[in-house]
Amino acid sequence: MNIDRHRRLRRTSALREMVRETFLHKEDFIYPIFVVEQENYKHEVPSMPGVYHLSLDLLLEEIQEVVSLGLKSVILFGVPNEKDDVGSCAYDENGIVQKATRLVKQQYPELVVVADTCLCQYTSHGHCGVVEDGYVQNDKSLKLLAKTAVSQAKAGADIIAPSNMMDGFVAAIRQGLDEAGFVDVPIMSYAVKYASAFYGPFRDAAHSTPQFGDRKTYQMDPANRLEALREAESDLNEGADFLIVKPALSYLDIMRDVKNNFNAPIVAYNVSGEYSMIKAAAQNGWISEKEIVLEKLISIKRAGADLIITYFAKDAARWLSENE
Ligand code: PBG
């Protein structure tokens, strides 16, 4: 009888390790941190257990922990006290992300600081660009985004990560950075970003829920697959150094498409809703958190991601150390 004996290679743990195709490393993770302008402030985001709003005076403690766990990179999100029509605090030299970046880079020059470049936390209407006549204006928004990126690079950000989904944002930001002398600062573009309900908890955390309408005129329709290739191609042509696919878990097919079609580091954003669902189930004792999280992280890498932005980064680093 001719049976294919696949189980031969699964018989022992050593054999399974020898034929393993995908691995998780601490270097794979980018840890998101929400910084606020208050003082002595550390409060858990209600819809994201284990994720905090942190004031600057408490930030370095957190960074110390991140570094000691062996993580190499964080992405900073600012939650400003003041918002206006044009998101002025996003490109203020003393804006919250700029201040946080300076502080972290002074103390931890080796840590890679990624700055999220968007306006939605900073605009009173909560949209990612300039709004006129009830519509987000593409080209007017580009100028402000470039300005934001330059101010973040000036503060010492190692990577600029624009998440606003305006057309031409990579070109505009690349030009802005180059003219300001930051030719060596890479752009990690949110190239493929869907209009997703999985961002709900993040919007609670970042206070960035749109005050009217939704983001469907700039973020992508979850039904589309080919459009992802067009978005990724434009961003690479415009000078993106990394391509983000976001969210991760419902979009693993897209991750693989992007990986197969383009030669650039691919970054998965394992978003807030994907985090909160697991947390909620784990808190109810319905699932085994550690195993579920490690399984989903490996599946994201298997799908083609080189790096993963994830709120589980610290937990995963701890679990990987335990397994060492
Ligand atoms: C800002 C931005 C969002 C996220 C990252 N940057 C929210 C949005 O587009 O509404 C979502 C991240 C998450 O859900 O974890 N544009």
Image (spheres, rainbow, N blue to C red):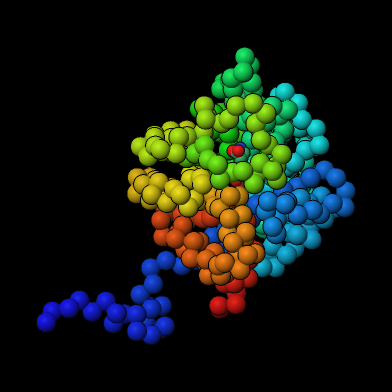
* Left or right, 301 with reference to 277: left
User: Which residue is drawn at the image coordinates 69% and 57% (left, top)?
Assistant: 49
Residue 280, image quadrant: bottom right
User: Which residue is drawn at the image coordinates 38% and 49% (left, top)?
Assistant: 253
Between 313 and 217, the one nearer to me in the picture: 217
Report whether residue 73 is seen: no
Q: In the picture shown, does residue 319 fall above or below 268?
A: below
Q: Position of residue 283 (x, y in %)?
A: 65, 64
Q: Position of residue 206 (x, y in %)?
A: 70, 42
Q: Position of residue 158 (x, y in %)?
A: 64, 47
Question: Which quadrant holds the N terminus?
Answer: bottom left
Report whether residue 58 is seen: yes
Between 135 and 113, the one nearer to me in the picture: 135
Q: Position of residue 224 (x, y in %)?
A: 39, 37
User: Which residue is drawn at the image coordinates 56% and 78% (left, top)?
Assistant: 324
Outermost residue on the left side: it is 1
Instruction: Tell me which image quadrant ligand 1 sits in.
Output: top right
Residue 304, image quadrant: bottom left
* Left or right, 51 with reference to 38: left
Outermost residue on the top side: it is 133
Between 135 and 187, the one nearer to me in the picture: 135
Residue 132, image quadrant: top right
Q: In the picture shown, does residue 73 fall above or below 183?
A: below
Outermost residue on the right side: it is 39
